[in-house]
Image (cartoon, helix red, strand yellow):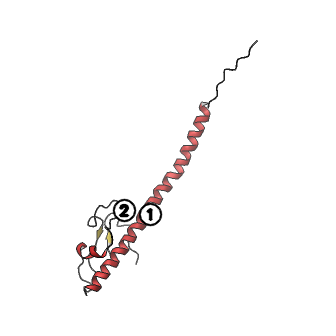
Amino acid sequence: MKIRNTRTAGFTLVEIMIVVAIIGLLAAIAIPNFVRARTTSQMNACINNLRQIDGAIQQWALENKKEPDAAVTEADVTPYLKNQVVCPSGGTTFADSYAVTTVAAAPTCLKVPATHVLPQ
């Protein structure tokens, strides 16, 4: 008499559901952290860009003997910047990313002006 063992190797539905639930739980924990890290890195990059722009404005003003209330334009500052400076939160050009007004005023971010602020 032969005993047949018809059981084949594989995973049951319950085992697969447990694995999917664990992966979903890990994703629910990890995704918000990735979004927060991306937002923080974009903010830090934008603040560093603002520092570079402010340094370029100060250098332009010093070389051209401008007063603190002298108006500054993008064309004045661009030669003093090494690369094209745009906001990492969605800027495509300098003009739609940053605003410069006078030598004494700090440059501002046009994309996220609430958090992308040059510290005093």
Q: Quadrant of residue 50?
A: bottom left
Q: Which mark is residue 103?
A: none
Secondary structure type for disc 1: helix
The residue at 44%/59% (across/down) is 38
Q: Quadrant of residue 120?
A: bottom left
120 with respect to 59 (left or right): right
Question: Going from the N terminus, do you reach mark 1 or mark 2 first?
Answer: 1
13 with respect to 92 (left or right): right
State whether residue 52 is above or below residue 63: above
Asked if residue 83 shows in the view, the reply is yes
Assess whether mark 2 and mark 1 are in contact (beta carbons under 8 angstroms): yes
Q: Which residue is mark 2?
A: 88
Q: Amino acid at mark 2?
A: Pro
Q: Which mark is residue 41?
A: 1
Secondary structure type for disc 2: loop
Asked if residue 104 shows in the view, the reply is no
Could you say where residue 81 lies in the image, as x and y percent from the top left?
Answer: 31, 73
**Residue occupying the far right of the picture:** 1
The residue at 49%/54% (across/down) is 32
**Measured Cα–Cα span from mark 1 to mark 2:** 9 Å
The residue at 26%/79% (across/down) is 102
9 with respect to 83 (left or right): right
Could you say where residue 79 lies in the image, as x and y percent from the top left?
Answer: 27, 75
Could you say where residue 17 lies in the image, as x and y percent from the top left?
Answer: 58, 36
Q: Amino acid at mark 1?
A: Ser
Could you say where residue 89 lies in the image, as x and y percent from the top left?
Answer: 36, 61
**Residue occupying the far front of the picture:** 82
- Position of the N terminus, as image quadrant, is top right
Q: Quadrant of residue 93?
A: bottom left
**Residue occupying the far top of the picture:** 1
